[in-house]
Image (tube, coloured by chain):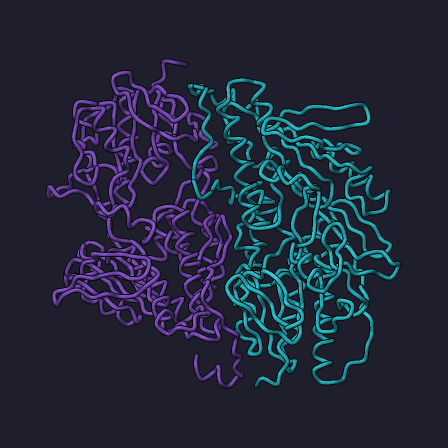
Chain colours: A purple, B cyan
Amino acid sequence: MKTKPHVVIVGGGFGGLETAKRLRKADVRVTLIDRRNYHLFQPLLYQVATGGLSPANIATPLRAILGKQANCEVVLAEVTGFDVANQTLLLADGELEYDILVVAAGATHSYFGRDDWEPLAPGLKTIGDATQIRRRIYLAFEAAERETDPELRTALMTFVIVGGGPTGVELAGALSEIAEHTLKHDFRHINPEDARIMIVEAGPHLLGFYPEELCKRAEEKVRCFNIEVHTHTKLVEITGEHVRLQTGEGDVVVPTRTVLWGAGVKANPLGKKLAAACAMETDRAGHVAVNEHLNLAGHENVYVIGDIATCLGEQGKPLPGLAAVAIQQGAYVAKTIAARANQTWKPTPFRYHDRGTMATIGRAAGVAQIGKRQFCGFFAWLLWLFVHLMLIVQFQNRVLILWQWAWNYVTFNRSARLITGDEEEVIVRPHHKREPEHRDADERESLV
Amino acid sequence: MKTKPHVVIVGGGFGGLETAKRLRKADVRVTLIDRRNYHLFQPLLYQVATGGLSPANIATPLRAILGKQANCEVVLAEVTGFDVANQTLLLADGELEYDILVVAAGATHSYFGRDDWEPLAPGLKTIGDATQIRRRIYLAFEAAERETDPELRTALMTFVIVGGGPTGVELAGALSEIAEHTLKHDFRHINPEDARIMIVEAGPHLLGFYPEELCKRAEEKVRCFNIEVHTHTKLVEITGEHVRLQTGEGDVVVPTRTVLWGAGVKANPLGKKLAAACAMETDRAGHVAVNEHLNLAGHENVYVIGDIATCLGEQGKPLPGLAAVAIQQGAYVAKTIAARANQTWKPTPFRYHDRGTMATIGRAAGVAQIGKRQFCGFFAWLLWLFVHLMLIVQFQNRVLILWQWAWNYVTFNRSARLITGDEEEVIVRPHHKREPEHRDADERESLV
């Protein structure tokens, strides 16, 4: 049995999982290592962060996906480093030998050297991040409801989203839906529609990777949802009480209690460790450069794929950090490994097929580019919905999500808007006292 | 507006929520206070703890339920005490005056004076508890998979459930389903069916509140699911490594890493505070005694209902801590308050109508007693399913849960078996090293 090559895959995201699944019939032994026991469908994480979906709707246990694949084993462990000379992976609680290594450890947020901002402006990469953001958003409204000082109340109802990429735009869109619809009848002392939602983007446009024409149309749509778009604006300070923004016309201080981070992404720290083990360098964001076969230069048995790698596309530009890239790379690597195990490999370089990109903007609005065709609005949103449903790994989840979306769409409801947390504490405002003032029904109607 | 009496309800569980909803048309102002922003459907919490349902499936935001009720306000706050003389409720961050107070703060676990056991044997009352238990169960299997020492592996796969009431029996039944079905194909080094599931009960029977005949039939059913039933057995020690059990034939030490607590319940600590504020005593478990109108003796404007109260039934026995009791009490109190506000109140004592009790035992098996009729088996389970679905507050959740149950029933799957936690750490076993041994497909088939 020892004769079969042992393929060790680090990471159960889109790239790693695809590699493992595609090796189903290959004459190899596969071990997939992950710190978490589930594959996370990250493109929908913003829905968890805003209470539209539950974590389990977008996460599937890795063992449920790979349990019946006889040549594959799942190990729940933390990778701490690489001993490339001895073909050994270092774990927090042991080590693991490999013949072939596939590193697909993904990315994490980058605060551009301001790691002290992390607790003040949580990013959105894990389920823990999503439930934390959910908690912050809904607690901010709860605190505003009980706040008597109008200035503090405004600060509590101001939401600053840093970064105008897809994550930032999707979060802003969902927040706007929460404020305008979901919470419509929920409060007695605030009007959730008064919430101020700001996207702060240093570059000239939101969703800047699209052609300028499309960007502009998307921005218009975003503004329709009562979202303030601040492009050419740099965030220079975050405190618990306010943010400071650098604009062309000088600095502006915006009082806010909720800052969400959708700005920067860097490779998983394992990228740097792998590079160091191979006497290589990473780029500034920690990405490991790979050759056209997705190998590390000089290490034919080490593949690096997905968001942790820098892989040059046809025009010499690095491929974007998209699920589609990771999946195609995983499929390519699996094919290569299987062919090498059979000694039928004919070296052909990896080539990314761009089938289009898309993002949602808000309720019933999206942007998409497919080949040369551009869409902005309802059709793009429908397309986005359809594609993402089809991509969700498990059949059960597909039905659950479809049902919840349909329900949320019709009723404007977000049933997963639970405030949970280990401490299960509520925001305690030590300095205030408010006795509820009840309004009569008619009075309320005029407000909402 | 100040003329309308202000009804303050503490707790958004079954009792408090029912009171608030039933006061919809009453000529009063209602404020419902809870530490959490959701109503939790506790009878299904064991399903969350075992990964069958997501937290949001059994929790509904209080504001979503009460948002359109114009005379009602929801306040997210922590109650810290009572100033009965001044008709004021003390909050962690302020205070709140009331004309009428309804205390429905519920119950929590009791470790019978051994509070040091709490971290070793988590109970099941909150969503935080449920996700923690879920985490422990699935991490135990993960750790066993990687464990090389057979004794440690056995300890990791031994689950001790303390208490043979409905919670203990339901947890054990769900655990047995996980071990025998859900995880069937998931592991390579352990056979989940080898899991040892024990219920430890000090009394003579499981589900001891049922007639003896029914208890015995239920116990037989429980044993069919490969669950060890240890009645007449007292837990006397819990360490991280083992439990010590006192049986008729002397002490037994069982090595285990997972102990779950379903044994004791005591009233919310607010019970003692309320009693002290009224110069009364509680019973040993902290329950506040109420009169036949569910009032505190001498305090006609203070009602205490649900699990925090002791209310005597027709035979002079205290009513059990059931959702049905709390709901009926809530309805009675609301009716009384509304009638008093109208001055149409004719004093009639509260009377509990026992419409039956039921519990699940495991896959497709339940116990039920409805009047004099007793059921044990598939029909009782169907009944249980139907009644609980009908009770779930929100329509959306009803469909979601039905779908997940049907799916789980047909596929034996539990899609919500995520290991999550704030630290998101995995169990680290510092002293071991194991290289995965892969088995061929046929070898595996023989095992499962």
Is any part of residue A217 visible from this angle? yes
Rendered location of residue A320, percent (x, y): 21, 46
Front in this rendered view, residue A53 or A391 = A53
Relative horizontal placement of residue A157, taking residue A401 as reference (left or right): left
**Up-down: is A359 above or below B227?**
below
Quadrant in the picture for residue A201? bottom left
* Residue B424: image location, x then y, percent: 43, 40
Q: Which of A346 and B315 is in front in this view?
A: B315
Q: Where is residue A346 in the image (x, y as percent from the top left)?
A: 20, 25
Q: Is residue B169 above or below residue B43?
A: above
**Does residue A383 show up?**
no
Residue in the image at 59% along x and 54% along y:
B402
Image quadrant in which you'd find residue A253: bottom left
The C terminus of chain B sits in image quarter: top right
Question: Residue B328: x percent and y percent?
Answer: 74, 66
Front in this rendered view, residue A209 or A171: A171
Q: In this view, does B232 lie above or below B389?
A: above
Extreme residue in the right direction: B315
x 74%, y 73%: residue: B300
> Residue at horizontal 15%, vertical 64%?
A247
Specify the quadrant that holds the N terminus of chain B. Answer: bottom right
**Numbered disc total:** 0
Q: In this view, does A137 lie above or below B339?
A: above
